[in-house]
Image (cartoon, rainbow, N blue to C red):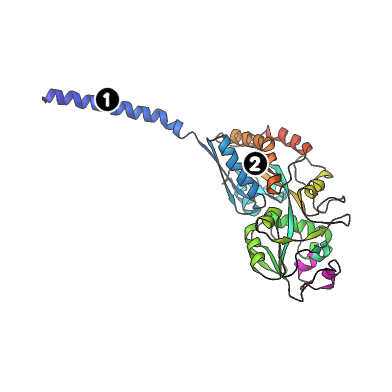
Amino acid sequence: MTPYNILMETKIMLKTLKLAAAALLILAPLAAAETSLTGAGATFPYPIYSKWFDEYHKAKPDVQINYQSIGSGGGIRQITERTVDFGATDGPMTDKMMFKIDGKLLHIPTVLGADVPVFNVKGVEKLNLSGPALAGIFLGTINRWNDPVIAQDNPEAKLPDARITVVHRSDGSGTTYIWTDYLSKVSPEWLKKAGRGTAVNWPTGLGGKGNEGVSSLVKQTPNSIGYVELIYAKQNDIDYASVKNAAGKWLKADIAGVTAAAAGAKMPADYRVSITDAPGEKSYPIASYTWLLIYQKNAGGKGAELKDFLRWMLKDGQTMASDLGYAPLPDGVKAMVAKTIEGVQ
């Protein structure tokens, strides 16, 4: 091959490489077109959120939603610091928390659920626990299973003369907020000594991280009691007690009881509402909404993707709630949320 031919082939090769490089540059944005949304927070709704994010990705393969189930306290902290695209909580943020926010942060209700008192007592499968009894147990003033306060509501149960081991959350938790919000309403002593919050100074007990951690500790600790979201009790096959509601009826948590608790509550414009100890014979007393925390204005086009997901959540997502033990949003609340979503940018 002559030097001239070698030179021409080299030029052709270089031209081909340049064309290929140019094609890659054109195609690169298409390959990177997948949008990734990141969120963190509550463990209470994690089973339904996990289902939703998977199903939404199937419907929109170009959108991937990653969620860390780290507790409501962590979700509030991360969305406040804007290290995630959305947070999640079961305890609405306080005015003091909202004051620290740079921008307008929305509480978007997604589903409703229930806290249940899970227990592990040999030979006892059915148990009634009133609000005052639960407050006494978690205060440590009722510390044996055959205490008269428990015994009077369970005449047929063979309650052992055994010390009660209390299990509570060790992390900042919306599940804890719901639990302590309820105890604060039914027990003046609890309100005075511990109060309500995503984290409180527990008078007694062992700490478990997440609903998963509490479920595990109760399941492996004889004579223990704790509190978890309903689905965790069902998935882990742990017994949970009936609770006396504001009307004096004993109710075991279910979707109907949670729905009834929400029915009588007037939803404020900012959606920060408590429905624990709700009136009505059919109302389960330790019920709550759970919320996604989303900024009204979002950078980098994330607002459009968040809005699309929220629209999907209201329509398709709600149909999946009951199968996982959650109550779907009431129609009136759905209509309110639909209007709020349209303001997300």
| Residue furthest bottom in the image | 161
Residue 46 to residue 314: above or below: below
Where's the N terminus, which quadrant?
A: top left
Tell me, yes or no, whether the two marked residues, 1 and 2, touch with CB atoms within 8 Å: no
Residue 75 seen in this snapshot = yes
Q: Which mark is residue 246?
A: none
Q: Where does the image place residue 142, in percent across and percent down from the top left?
A: 79, 71
**Residue 116, located in which quarter of the rendered image?**
bottom right
Q: Which amino acid does label 1 sit on?
A: Lys
Label 1 crowd bin: few (<14), some (14–19), many (20+), radius 10 Å: few
Q: Which amino acid does label 2 sit on?
A: Ile
**Residue 253, located in which quarter of the rendered image?**
bottom right
| Residue furthest left in the image | 2
Position of 65 with respect to 195 (left or right) is: left
Q: Say which label, 1 or 2, has the lower sequence index.
A: 1
Over which residues does the magenta segment extend?
134-161
Position of 297 with respect to 140 (left or right) is: left
Question: Residue placed at 24% from the left, 27% from the top?
Answer: 13
Identify residue for label 1. Answer: 15
Q: Where does the image place residue 70, in percent across and percent down from the top left?
A: 60, 54
Q: Nearer the viewer, residue 294 or 244?
A: 244
Q: Where does the image place residue 286, in percent across and percent down from the top left?
A: 78, 54
- Tally the numbered discs: 2
Identify residue for label 2. Answer: 294
Where's the C terminus, which quadrant?
A: top right
Residue 159 to residue 75: above or below: below
Which is closer to the viewer, label 1 or label 2? 1
